[in-house]
Image (tube, helix red, strand yellow):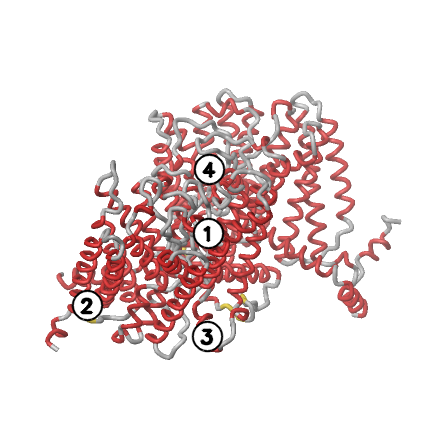
């Protein structure tokens, strides 16, 4: 009772506290893995877990849940992601993962933060490369890297909501602010139960992909690591050549299936489990997503075949790359720079098709990023309605998606989102070109960061490092975009409203 | 028999397909477009007499025949009142008819090798896109005038379409300002509006021509250049003068004025200076020019004083989507090329001759995004879209949102088409943006001009739909496509057609 009376009332700090405790638990697990891997990075990981746990404990115990209005919710979600991403750099910094000759402390910090944000936001862009090989890292750090994507995939706030009963009704708002898409459907009477169900499905999917990858010939460590980044549609790999390292069709098929499931609305999975039958065919967004992927694969296969690649090889690389970009996975199946799977060396037309998938991503309510197929469909339906209304000015026409009518508020919401997205793309490209990167690399880099995709076109292809394509300030800009993109823009932009209001209040009360 | 009144009466009796409003719109558009080219050919033929006079006879004969034929056909078009969408259909058909008919003029004169090339040149002229594949040195005065005046016609048609059919800001809601109501009344009197726009164009051309001809330029060259500047076309007959500082200053002013809304110019002309200068769209336009000039100056790393003028020249040429073929100066960074591309995409003020997205639409979209930010915090809030002090009607906001969607779709599909034809990703993207915004010329990263003559005929033709859509502000073209689709659907449903005919005869 005494403790409660001394506590600070702040939803943001409270949620941050428990999120940090979860993070420290995760790092603790990676420290255990390091223990069995010749103790490489063990001290760094153990120390990181301790520091973050102490910080989390202090925050959690010294605060209680405060206001739960919209501004507080955005502030809480934004602050949690910022703090977790920032402290997520501690293991990298203590282990010296990004130390290399010729760069100073600020650039090392930018690289660590880039990798951390890329992990938690499930982007999959990396600063590892020829200058700093992934395979030279210890198992602990590698597993930590994969774990950041796994935590980020479903959402750290969803995790917090599932174990924090004190959040009550505001929990759905928190999940809604964090989840990709146009809103979260409650699949259980209680919010915490909804969050838990999502995590159970997520964990089951990860386990299933792990088993299938192991059965396909991957080692146990690699299988679990890749399953985590497949279910989360993140795209980090424990190998420098990503999935191309194994050059195995069966592994690629498992990864593609896992990515497809990860990029599907989790509510559909929940419904299918509940009804004990596959309910995917009834969802118009999923149907569109699937049809688009199939069309993309067909088109790219055709284009590659016309360009001289054998049909089987074209089908294989087209399927893998279209699905990996369409689901915002970002894995690569290139066996080297310039190989069949390296889409940067493909024809321009194939790259433009890939750019489409890079922009739109997967379904709402999934772990994937991008603008989302739902928004594309709403945009199409709205355009069709408006063009029809010009021909029939007196008719009362509604935008429709499948059998559902789309309310005008949703159309306006999508329009607002697309405008802010466009503004961010232009601003980002502007900054990156001003920092010296070429136009296509900058443009696709911003799309990739905002859509949490991973690779891009130009100098940031599937077998390249972001160090090759962007300077340190450029990478710093991109990591901000990854964060904004992961939270679907608005929470990140509105997280400063609450501190602003508080400071205005404080100034007024002083006067 | 074909000229007999009874035949004509039979054509227009109830149930006849010739009084279908959509068909009437198509016919009116085609006949109108072709006759405009006919008149222009006659005028160009006469102007050709000021030069060698080699093309005079061809132009006069072609123009006369086309005009007479159109006059004959116009008697067969029923006098049916058209709706807004049918008007848009007519405008698109008229524009396409202009392009097709004038491409025959280029072929007839004999300077073009194929119909593809003449179609592209004609399309570039009417859509005011500065993408030319012609060697202008081989042209006589008549054809040079024909080409330059085509730009003016294209620009004029686009402004009229924007004013009559697609007003973004109709100032119907909540406007309490007597000044705005005056503007509204002005826009509602269509004939007066058309006359005023024409007058503003004429005066602007006269002023720019006179100013240019004061220097080293001949009157004819000055006239051609002023036609290009005022129409935001960008074609030049003699590019040597583009390096002259005095010509550059005149063009800067001409292009900035061409990118200004004619409503603002009208306010200025009628002496309402304060109200004209209070326009928030004008503030944005001028701020964009100022900031971009400074950034462009910094990013071209040339350092000399003259480059500030040249920066302003490039910026005003891009934002007004004029696209004169100025040669690059200094060392361009990638950001400088991207800045120009961005300015081209943004475009000038609404109700101006320029293409692109246009500032008013952009401001409406910004307001939409701010409204969404507010709604995130206050989901039940009723927030109106405002630009300056004016509230924009929901219907217009919806059209702007669709415009944005269509704009991006066309850029993407044109880029895809170009890459399929073998163009690199960068060139395809830049070309499609230039075509859709009716800007040109296509520039490389270092500012060098990419000659469209090096493109294959297929690649050039792939740019034409984007150029046409961009010049007509997208919606008319899509409405026309809608008509085409529905009519072709009806064609493949013979039973429905038969029943419709039957019922129309019974009634």
Chain name for mark 2: A
Chain name for mark 4: B
- x, y percent for residue A257: 48, 61
The residue wearing badge 2 is A60
Q: Do the residues under discs 4 and 3 have CB atoms within 8 angstroms?
A: no
Q: Earlier in the sequence, mark 2 or mark 3?
A: 2
The residue wearing badge 1 is A358
What residue do we see at 32% from left, 50% from top?
Answer: A479
Q: Which mark is residue B319?
A: none
Q: Which mark is residue B318?
A: 4
Q: CA distance from mark 3 to mark 1?
A: 30 Å
Q: Do the residues under discs 4 and 2 have CB atoms within 8 angstroms?
A: no
What residue do we see at 25% from left, 52% from top?
Answer: A38
Tell me the mark number nearer the camera, choosing from 4 and 1. 1
| Residue in the foreground of this view, choosing between B256 and B455 | B455
| Residue in the foreground of this view, choosing between B247 and A473 | A473
Q: CA distance from mark 2 to mark 3?
A: 35 Å
Q: 10 Å neighbourhood of mark 2: few (<14), some, or many (≥20)? A: many
Tell me the mark number nearer the camera, choosing from 4 and 2. 2
Helix or strand or loop: what does disc 3 sit on? Answer: helix
Q: CA distance from mark 1 to mark 2?
A: 38 Å
Residues at marks 4 and 1 on the same chain: no
Helix or strand or loop: what does disc 4 sit on? Answer: helix
Residues at marks 2 and 3 on the same chain: yes
Left or right: residue B160 versus residue A95 is right
- x, y percent for residue A228: 37, 60
Q: Is residue A140 above or below residue B273?
A: below
Q: Which mark is residue A273?
A: 3
């Amino acid at each position: 009772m005494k403790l409660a009376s001394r506590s600070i009332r702040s939803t943001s700090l409270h949620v941050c506290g428990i999120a940090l405790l979860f993070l420290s638990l995760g790092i603790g697990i990676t420290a255990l893995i390091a223990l069995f891997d010749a103790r490489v990075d063990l001290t760094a990981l153990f120390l990181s877990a301790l520091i973050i746990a102490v910080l989390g404990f202090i925050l959690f115990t010294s605060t209680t849940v405060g206001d739960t209005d919209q501004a507080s919710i955005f502030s809480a979600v934004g602050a949690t992601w910022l703090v977790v991403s920032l402290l997520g750099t501690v293991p990298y910094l203590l282990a010296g993962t990004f130390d290399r000759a010729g760069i100073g402390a600020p650039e090392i910090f930018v690289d660590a933060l880039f990798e951390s944000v890329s992990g938690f936001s499930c982007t999959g862009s990396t600063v590892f490369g020829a200058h700093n090989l992934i395979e030279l890292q210890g198992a602990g750090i590698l597993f930590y890297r994969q774990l950041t994507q796994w935590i980020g995939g479903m959402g750290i706030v969803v995790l917090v909501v599932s174990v924090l009963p004190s959040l009550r009704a505001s929990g759905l708002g928190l999940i809604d602010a964090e989840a990709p898409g146009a809103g979260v459907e409650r699949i259980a009477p209680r919010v915490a139960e909804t969050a838990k169900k999502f995590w159970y499905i997520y964990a089951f999917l990860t386990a299933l992909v792990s088993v299938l990858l192991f059965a396909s010939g991957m080692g146990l460590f690699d299988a679990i690591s890749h399953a985590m980044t497949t279910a989360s549609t993140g795209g980090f790999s424990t190998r420098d050549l990503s999935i191309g390292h194994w050059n195995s069709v069966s592994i690629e098929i498992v990864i593609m299936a896992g990515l497809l499931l990860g990029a599907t609305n989790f509510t559909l999975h929940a419904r299918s489990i509940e009804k004990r039958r596959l309910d995917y065919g009834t969802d118009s967004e999923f149907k569109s997503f699937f049809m688009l992927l199939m069309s993309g694969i067909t088109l790219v296969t055709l284009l590659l075949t016309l360009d001289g690649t054998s049909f089987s090889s074209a089908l294989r690389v087209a399927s893998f790359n279209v699905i990996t970009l369409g689901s915002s996975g970002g894995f690569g199946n290139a066996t080297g720079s310039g190989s069949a799977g390296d889409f940067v060396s493909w024809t321009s037309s194939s790259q433009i098709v890939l750019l489409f998938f890079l922009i739109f991503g997967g379904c709402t309510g999934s772990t994937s990023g991008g603008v989302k197929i739902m928004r594309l469909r709403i945009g199409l339906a709205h355009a069709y309605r408006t063009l029809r209304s010009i021909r029939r000015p007196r008719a009362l026409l509604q935008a429709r998606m499948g059998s559902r009518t789309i309310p005008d508020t949703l159309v306006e919401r999508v329009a607002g989102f697309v405008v802010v997205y466009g503004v961010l793309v232009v601003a980002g490209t502007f900054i990156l070109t001003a920092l010296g990167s070429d136009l296509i690399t900058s443009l696709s880099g911003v799309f990739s960061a905002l859509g949490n995709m991973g690779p891009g076109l130009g100098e940031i292809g599937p077998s390249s490092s972001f160090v090759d394509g962007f300077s340190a300030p450029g990478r710093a800009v991109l990591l901000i975009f990854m964060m904004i993109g992961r939270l679907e823009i608005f929470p990140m932009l509105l997280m400063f409203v609450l501190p602003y209001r508080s400071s205005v209040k404080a100034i007024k009360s002083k006067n | 028999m074909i000229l007999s009144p009874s035949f004509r009466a039979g054509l227009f009796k109830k149930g006849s397909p010739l009084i279908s409003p959509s068909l009437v719109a198509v016919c009116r558009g085609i006949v109108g477009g072709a006759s405009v080219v006919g008149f222009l050919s006659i005028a160009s033929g006469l102007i050709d007499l000021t030069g060698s006079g080699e093309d005079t006879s061809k132009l006069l004969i072609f123009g006369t025949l086309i005009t007479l034929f159109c006059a004959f056909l116009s008697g067969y078009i029923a006098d049916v009142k058209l709706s807004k969408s049918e008007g848009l259909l007519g405008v698109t058909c008229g524009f396409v008819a202009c392009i097709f008919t004038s491409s025959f003029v280029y072929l007839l004169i004999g300077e073009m090798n194929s119909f593809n090339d003449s179609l592209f040149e004609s399309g570039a002229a009417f859509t005011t896109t500065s993408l030319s594949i012609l060697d202008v040195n081989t042209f006589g005065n008549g054809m040079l005038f024909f080409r330059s005046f085509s730009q003016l016609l294209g620009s004029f048609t686009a402004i009229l379409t924007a004013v009559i059919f697609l007003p973004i800001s109709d100032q119907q809601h909540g406007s309490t300002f007597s000044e705005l109501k005056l503007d509204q009344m002005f826009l509602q009197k269509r004939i007066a509006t058309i006359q005023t726009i024409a007058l503003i164009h004429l005066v602007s051309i006269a002023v720019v021509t006179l100013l240019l001809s004061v220097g080293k330029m001949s009157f004819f060259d000055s006239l051609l250049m002023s036609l290009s500047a005022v129409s935001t076309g960008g074609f030049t007959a003699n590019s040597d003068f583009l390096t002259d500082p005095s010509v550059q200053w005149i063009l800067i002013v001409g292009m900035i004025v061409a990118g200004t809304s004619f409503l603002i110019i009208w306010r200025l002309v009628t002496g309402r200076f304060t109200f004209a200068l209070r326009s928030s769209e004008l503030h944005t336009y001028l701020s964009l020019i100022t900031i971009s000039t400074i950034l462009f100056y910094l990013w071209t790393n040339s350092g000399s004083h003259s480059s500030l003028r040249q920066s302003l020249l490039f910026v005003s040429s891009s934002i007004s989507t004029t696209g004169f073929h100025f040669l690059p100066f200094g060392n361009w960074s990638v950001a400088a090329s991207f800045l120009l591309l961005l300015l081209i995409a943004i475009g000038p003020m609404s109700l101006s001759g320029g293409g692109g997205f246009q500032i008013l639409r952009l401001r409406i979209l910004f307001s939409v995004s701010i409204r969404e930010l507010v709604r995130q915090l206050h989901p039940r809030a009723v927030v109106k879209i405002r630009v300056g002090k004016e509230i924009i009607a929901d219907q217009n906001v919806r059209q702007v949102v669709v415009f944005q969607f269509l704009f991006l779709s066309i850029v993407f599909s044109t880029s895809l088409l170009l890459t399929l034809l073998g163009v690199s990703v960068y060139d395809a993207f830049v070309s499609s943006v230039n075509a859709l915004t009716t800007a040109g010329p296509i520039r490389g990263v270092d500012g060098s001009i990419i000659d469209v003559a090096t493109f294959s005929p297929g690649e050039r033709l792939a740019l034409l739909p984007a150029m046409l859509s961009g010049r007509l502000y997208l919606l008319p073209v899509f409405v026309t496509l809608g008509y085409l689709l529905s009519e072709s659907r009806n064609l493949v449903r013979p039973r429905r057609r038969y029943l419709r005919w039957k019922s129309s005869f019974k009634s």
